[in-house]
Image (tube, grey):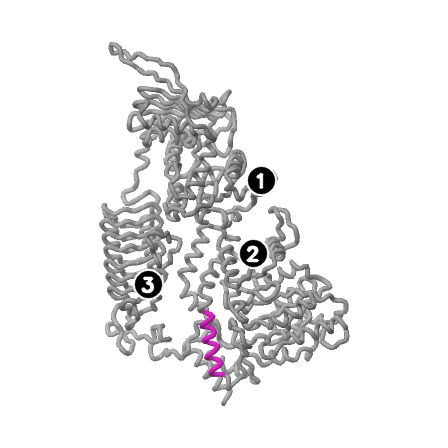
Amino acid sequence: MTSIVSSEQPTVAVIGSGYWGKNLVRNYHELGSLRLIYDSNDTLLEQLQHKYPNVDTCLALTDALNRKDIDGVVIATPAETHYQIAREALLAGKHVFVEKPLVLDEEQGVELIELASRKSLILMVGHLLQYHPVFIKLKEMVLSGELGRINYIYSNRLNLGKIRREENILWSFAPHDISMILTLASAAPTFVQATGGNYLHQSIADVTTTHMEFPSGLKAHIFVSWLHPFKEQKLVVVGDRKMLVFDDTKDWNEKLVSYPHEIKWQQNIPVPAKAAAERIDFPQSEPLRNECAHFLECIKTGQQPLTDGYEGLRVLKVLKASQRSLDCGGIKIDLQETDKITEKGPKDCSFGEKVFVHESAFVDSNVTIGNDSKIWHFSHILSGSKIGERCSIGQNVVVGPDAVVGNGCKIQNNISVYKGVTLEDDVFCGPSMVFTNVFNPRASIRRMDELRPTLVRQGATLGANSTIVCGVTIGRHAFVGAGAVVTRDVPDYALMMGNPARRAHWMCACGVRLDAALQCPACGKEYYLESEDILSTGGASTPPVDKKIHFVDLSRQQRRILPEIEKNISAVLSHGNYIMGPEIKELELQLGKYVGSKHVISCSSGTDALLMPLMAKGVGPGDAVFTTPFTFIATAEVISLLGATPIFVDIDPKTFNICPEHLSRAIQALKSGDGSYPLPKNAHGLRPAAVIPVDLFGLPADYDRLMEIAAKENFFVLEDAAQSFGGSCNGRKSCSFGHAAGTSFFPAKPLGCYGDGGAIFTDDDELAHTMQSIRVHGKGSHKYDNARIGLNARLDTLQAAILLPKLAVLPEELIERQRVANRYTEGLCKLVATPTIPAGMVSAWAQYSILVENRDSLQASLTGQKIPSAIYYPTPLHLQTAFASLGYAPGDFPLSEASSKSILSLPMHPYLQDEEIDRVIAAIAYAETR
């Protein structure tokens, strides 16, 4: 376990605050570590909030697990929920304390232990009596040999109630006693036998007696009942020199008593030699306080808990065996027999037909091995790994944990395929080649949470002693030469040599180097270059010039970041928090850092990202909201949805964004009613409330002038940054200019998900709080206390998981977008009107749009040459049917109308190759000059 270097007191959330949980709440609060209480009972939470006013409460488990300021989770819920909650907490990176029993299934217990180990997290089980000062003293006396040979231990835990229906008396009372007896025996029992009676319910035992036999000859029994006339909690340890009695119902000075009785043999007859009882002194302290403090200390220092997951698993095995005996009429259960595993591996593994595992190899639990695969000498397949069919795993190979090996792979000797490495089908790994899993390892610094995934695509070959630095993708049928050190992505079919490895030539899928004409001398297959680093199959009949150009090509981006996307999606599928999962908080954090915004509220679409700020500001009937008619309908749609009136303002013909001068004219016309600027009919009496500038095509609007106008008029400014995420003005990022900003994650945007999504940015605390409420149906302080009318406008966790790796590569993609725009402008500036970028501004280049007089004929010509294009927007909003009731007419906004007749957008994405851009330029030149 890695130590946590921190002097601060760890913080915890208590999950479940009922019968026993309230005691944990009290202790952690008194220890100064309690930050949050979760419970499904809102009435109980209200009582606790009154009692502990400085502690947060919540009704949603995800709220607790997503909190960055919480180090550990304390679980005091029904036993059947322990596994799921503990697993989710560990996956969320939280240390876990779970009340007894650990889980109800041994395999689940093993999974939790392995998960905690992989993540270097504390997993502790609440076996309270291990922290009782009386038992600590008793254990010290027993293990020191003071009692002599231990012959017999018995424990009674009896009471009238608390009677449960979610578990029987065995599972409710006996875990404490089993834990103590196993500790004193210093061994696991060989046999377990249990009998009992069901008196209040036909399937729930109210009274049980459990017998245990140990290898040393020690025997023990546990008698538990909640149908007993008085309370008794007594542990008796019988040695051949002394006997100890731990009676927890007594006062402190009488709880532990020693009886130095002996059995002496006189003339072959055993004769008891009684002696006076002796009270044993020990330091007094509250057991639960000790247990809670121990968990905090383990979090702080990284030390293994006294009652760790393995202790919980040992107790669980005895409980399961006792229950089996109870269910079968009191039969004797041989624990050694039940612990045996199958010939090939643990019982929870999945093996196909004709799988061979050498007797010197070791296969952990939860491993899948496909048909006809072979695991050779001294290899180790770690938990969670998946090996496909027809694989050969050579000598001294380690796979996993959680590694994936496809079908037909051959992994030769002395190789470690670490967690995060995925081999697709038919990959060859030569002897002693190396995968790394951390980019910059240090022996003294823990970096296992910085693992970078590595993907080796189908048919690739990795030569002997080569090194693959983590985080790269090896392309299909690529060939990495012996001893090469790969530090960056490798294209399909590339032959890589050297340190650092560089492409020396190209290889055929059959493994033979291509000749100068890119033809395989062995099989005759022909290839051609799509670009400098993209080789494809084909021949003279399919030259690159005929390749389809995509208007927006998401597939090339996906190939680049697919391992990260698949890893993130897998994590979401694993933790199951599909709504407001941890990826949502991480995305909001990263977006805020990128933009420099105090608050980020992710949401379900770019439309909701505009609607919610207006709702939060109370915009509605009687309000006028100014915006541009040269945009997508969502900008004005949200105004009308709230009953407010959109007032359109013409654009700057060079930037296509709203013109500040025209905005001032429209405001004055509304105030004076003099008809000096086109206004909607019935505009008289409207209250100017807000303006929504649109950062069209990726270029921020003129916010210096717009904010001056807004300050003068006391306007709310909502930046429509649906197309401009990544753009900037004088170093300030788009989404940071207005009082709030909304952006869209529609797939074609500069930062897009694989569906609908959006986000809102603001530095206004009150506005952010209101929008967070609106996002979840107007949620108030409690789950079913809705403070206002809201929306169901949350971003799906899966979309956040996709956006995170996309955001990571966005800075590089923006550079590439600028490259594409520069090449377009250089090639087209003398043919058509190209975009204007004012000084100090940087466009995100959502679109590259030109103005041409013969727009329709040019578009038809491009289509004939297999070049896509688009028109944004053919009809300004003031002339669309949806806004006919406003009474605007053709000619009201001549600059917008002129732009709509001549605008044409060209293919634009960061993965356009120079050859493709030049092909577009040539096609436009041909059409414009013929």
Displayed quadrant of residue 54:
top right
Query: Where does residue 708 sit, x and y in percent of width and height?
Result: 65, 70
815 within the magenta span = yes
**Label 2 sits on residue:** 794
Residue furthest front as drawn: 7
Majority SS type along the magenta span:
helix
**Label 1 sits on residue:** 52
421 within the magenta span = no
For the residue labelled by badge 2, is the local secondary structure a helix, a strand or a loop?
loop
**Label 3 sits on residue:** 458
Q: In the rendered view of the protein, which quadrant contains the N terminus? A: top left
Q: Residues within 10 Å of mark 2 (few under 14, many from 20)?
A: many
Cα gap from disc 2 to disc 3, whole angstroms: 38 Å
Query: Where does residue 25 sit, x and y in percent of width and height?
Result: 52, 38
Whether residue 874 is visible here, answered yes or no, is yes
Displayed quadrant of residue 526:
bottom left
Cα gap from disc 1 to disc 3, whole angstroms: 58 Å
Which residue is at a point 56% across and 56% down the rendered structure image?
794
Which residue is at a point 39% across and 31% down the rendered structure image?
179
Q: Which comes sooner in the sequence, label 2 or label 1?
A: 1
> Which residues, given as a range, are shown in magenta?
813-828
Q: How many marks?
A: 3
Whether residue 421 is visible here, answered yes or no, is no
> In the image, is residue 289 above or below residue 531?
above
Which residue is at a point 54% across and 83% down the rendered structure image?
833
Q: Amino acid at mark 1?
A: Tyr
